[in-house]
Image: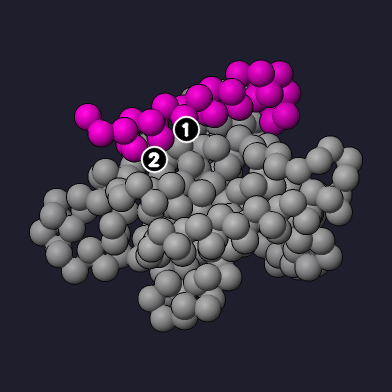
Amino acid sequence: MGHSHALSGAAVWLAAAPALAALPETLGRPELAAVTGSITSPPELIAGAVVCAGAAMLPDLDHPNSTIAQTFGPVTWALSKGLNAVSGGHRNMTHSLFFSVLCGVGAYLLAAHQPIGRDVLVILMIGLALRAVGIGVPRKTITSAVMNAVLTAGIFVAFTGLGVGYAWLGLAVGIGCLAHVLGDCLTERGCPVLWPIRGRWLLPFDIGFKTGKTFERRFLGPALAITVLVLAYVRLMPV
């Protein structure tokens, strides 16, 4: 479900941030600092977690009834219908390593060369993250959409005011997509991780739980929420 994917994206980002920040030194490639940026500074750490949470929704754009397909009305619905047809239906091309890398590289290029496109992408990711975790008023579609838009704009303005850069945007988007794919590999249907090879992966050893059932609603969702809060506290509070 959407909230599980978004929370898993945020959790993975918060968990991986120190290792990502250390990549230039670890690999002896100082030029990689242009990709990681100041990834562990508090404002950028939180911004990265939000963007990664939104990006964790992208693979489900191949399903016209998914949260992401309904987020921005007819625009995302039409895009979802087209992608569903091109990719071969739900849980095909978009649920693969190829798609994760493609989205990550595209986001990196936007961050490096197209500031306006970068900002639009960041705004979309914030909006998706808010929608996924249930920000809105039950059964009030228009009110929820307005609330999402206002909060999204406010968060983006806040990030801008705090001096957030987006050198890491490609990493956040790619990792968010990959977190979604790996999460779906825990379910009964699995994912074609190595698409276009059609075999589906189930991890680990075919847990095979059903999405939207008791396990996800009562155990997995709350566990992911607690994990995000604990990781955020650990990363943000000085030792």
Image quarter in which the C terminus is found? top left
Residue situated furthest front in the rendering = 161
Residue 173 in view here: no
120 w.r.t. 143: above or below: below
> What mark, if any, has residue 14 been given in the picture?
2
Q: Where is residue 214 in the image (x, y as percent from the top left)?
A: 71, 18
The residue wearing badge 1 is 228
- Residue type, label 2: Leu
Q: Identify which residue is drawn at 58% across, 70% down.
A: 120
- Residue type, label 1: Val
- Residue 211 is one of the magenta-drawn residues: yes
Q: Identify which residue is drawn at 67% across, 62% down.
A: 87
> What mark, if any, has residue 36 been given in the picture?
none
Q: In this view, does 129 lie to the left or right of 64?
A: left
200 w.r.t. 128: above or below: above
Choose between 212 and 54: the one closer to the eye: 54
Image quarter in which the N terminus is found? top right
Choose between 140 and 97: the one closer to the eye: 140
Choose between 200 and 37: the one closer to the eye: 37
How did the renderer colour the structure? one colour
Residue situated furthest right in the rendering = 139
